[in-house]
Image: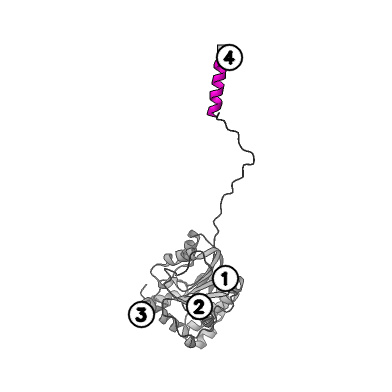
Amino acid sequence: MNCGSAESTRQQLRDWYEGMPGQWLEAEEQRLLNEILPTLFGYHLLQVGVSYMDDCLVSSKIPNQMVMDIDEPPCVDNLREVSLKRVNYLRGAPECLPIASDSLDVLMLSHTLEFTSNPHEILREADRTLIPDGHVIIFGFNPWGWWMLWRVILRWRGKPPWCGRFIRFSRLRDWLQLLGFDIVEAHGYFYRPPFAHKGLMAKLSFFEKLGSRWWTFFSGAYLIVAKKRVATLTPIRPRWRPRRSRLVAPELIGNSSASTRGEQTN
């Protein structure tokens, strides 16, 4: 990863989402969240990283919504995201979540794994903090497809998102399965090249239909929804009838020996 500090990386990534093609990518991610969040239930939802999307959590039915970032909590009046005005804001690192174990129902990692030196630790924190049957939502950049060319050319500049370490979908799936997660949903999205020209992007909109049907491997980004597997226990059948002891009590042995000696004397 050729990015700078974590704080500057997050801010530069927010700035990238403000321009093109970040806004188109944001619209696709918001559309996917509006379909997925209403199907997930519980009491506590944590989003790691300040959202780049307006009302990204508004479609969720979970009452206690929290947002955590490594920066200082922003002023509510200056928040662009309307949804953040209704949630609790936390400060912390994704590698060490300030959350009790087995307490979260949903955890959302929006392009968090690409900009850390230890993505495995973040996934282990997800496993620790989620309750059994809890869900983790992961947005990730695909290292293949059209975006690979831009990443190779622009990575040396050290600017997000191109400076991040993009993780293959298959590798992330294997990591989750090793931790005991089951993949519930997986979607690729944004199949157009990441041009900044609005007119050209509009002309290439047919790439989305073709890509979702034929070029799923070449999507610009992907979404994974995984469910924490419940540890199963092997049931033990109860023993209804007590098993007879094969050992003779010591007092019975003594009485038996005495009676035997008495018979021999007589």
**Viewer-closest of 32 and 10:** 10
Q: Are marks 3 and 2 in contact (CB under 8 Å)?
A: no
Amino acid type, mark 2: Asn
* 10 Å crowding of disc 3: few (<14), some (14-19), many (20+): few
Disc 2: which residue:
88
Name the front one of labels 4 and 1: 4
Direction right: furthest residue: 240
**Viewer-closest of 207 and 220:** 220
x, y (%) of residue 230? Answer: 55, 58
CA–CA distance between discs 3 and 4? Answer: 105 Å
Q: Residue at x 43, y 65 (%)?
A: 120
Amino acid type, mark 1: Tyr
Name the front one of labels 1 and 3: 1
Choose the circle earlier in sequence order: 4 or 1.
1
x, y (%) of residue 203? Answer: 54, 85
Choose the circle earlier in sequence order: 3 or 4.
3
CA–CA distance between discs 4 and 1? Answer: 79 Å
CA–CA distance between discs 1 and 2? Answer: 13 Å
